[in-house]
Image (spheres, rainbow, N blue to C red):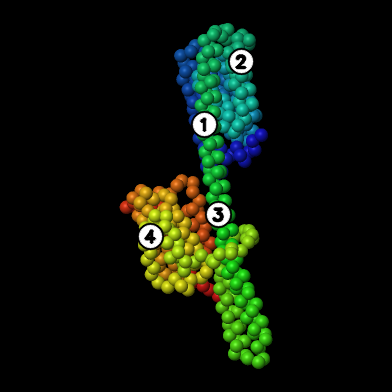
Amino acid sequence: MTSPASSDALLGSGWSRRTVIAVEAALIMLALAIELGGTAGAAQHQGRGDLGAAGIAWLVAGIAAMPWRRRFPASALTVAFVTTLLYWSLGYPRGPVFVALIVTFGYAVLIGRRLLAITSIVLGFLLFPWLGWLLGREKIPGPGAFIGLAAWLIVLVSVMEVIRSRRERARETERTRAEALARAAADERVRIAQELHDVVAHTMSVINVQAGVALHLMDDDPNQARDALATIKDVSKDGLVELRSILGALRAVDEGAPRSPTPTLRRLPDLVARAEATGVDVQVEIDGDVDTLPVNVDVAAYRIIQESLTNVARHSDRPEAVVRIHRDGDALGVEVVDAGSRATVAPGGSGIAGMRERAASVGGRLDAGPENGGGFAVRARLPVATGD
């Protein structure tokens, strides 16, 4: 059973209620123009007389059921089916009177109500040719009527099933992509938490030791106690800045501290050496002081460069990279340009998403994309100013 909420989603993701109402109104006006106007024009050449008030009432009743298909698809299809069948079987002028029936039937197919759709098809195939004859309003149908109706119904069902299948594939693709991005973001948050675990543990350890020293020397050596308190102030300030930067990004507790040293820009030469060992020609340009960065910014910059060089090794047909690091006042600029002539990033990868999450975790931003002259560039701007 399809809920109204899921049915509404079929009209288009992100549509406002006012837009939905406008679309429904336009659809109803179009149906009225086709069914009433088209049939009235066709009636002049059939010898069946005019539509009449009763004929117009049957057609309008079917069209009036169309807006209800989104909340009550079975009821809307039933009303459209019955009114169209009675109009057709009571001998009124022939014309394009199936708009409401097609719309409500097609909607039932799109939302997966196959039993409802198949039932209406079977009943339509049996009743539309025969009911008029049984009521004494039409001649007995010939084989051609059944063949034509069967062909028309097969085409209608096939078209609607193709549309439904494509919509399902598109929704599944979007859902899979969203899940992959969510997993990438969650994994990156865990990695950030693990890397900062050592920093937080170190900060707390220093505060604990220095507090003990201050208490022990408060009376005997006030100057040394004052230095210990100053150290506590500086260390706790840095720790608070680091914690503030990740609270908005992390929603899970780390499951274990890393045993290797925290990767920072001080280990950039090792990273470059490993990249060159994989065949990447790397040039490094550093401008400004990068030795006094906050640890979380230092780690984020290192990881962004690491992922970018990995992408160069994997995806560039001519792996040549330029790494530029620029300290500009209260911001750190990180740029990795892949000079490969046809450098690309594999579709669906999570590397770019992970780098954006890394930059966002420290309050920065990251842009990545192909260069006008060829190649691919990753550019990040990370704030490094610290406040109280």
Q: Where is residue 31 in the image (x, y as percent from the top left)?
A: 52, 28
Q: Residue 163 carries which label?
A: 1
Q: Where is residue 250 in the image (x, y as percent from the top left)?
A: 59, 60
Q: Which of marks 3 and 4 is nearer the N terminus?
A: 3
Q: Which of marks 3 and 1 is in front?
A: 3
Q: Say above or below: 96 vs 227.
A: above
The disc placed on residue 185 is: 3
Q: Which residue lies furthest to the front in this view?
A: 277
Q: Earlier in the sequence, mark 3 or mark 1?
A: 1
Q: Which of 280 and 35 is in front in this view?
A: 280
Q: Which residue is drawn at 58% across and 7% down?
A: 140
Q: Horizontally, is 149 left or right of 369 in the view? A: right
**Real-space Cα separation, disc 4 to disc 1, in angstroms:** 50 Å
Q: Residues within 10 Å of mark 2 (few under 14, many from 20)?
A: few
The structure residue drawn at horizontal position 46% and vertical position 14%, both measured from the top left corner, is: 45
Residue 37 lies left or right of residue 83; in this view the side is: left
Number of the label disc, if any, that sits on residue 132: none
Residue 125 in percent (x, y) is at 59, 17
Q: Which of marks 1 and 2 is nearer the N terminus?
A: 2
Residue denoted by label 2: 126
Numbered disc 1: secondary structure: helix
Query: SS of the residue at dot 3?
Result: helix
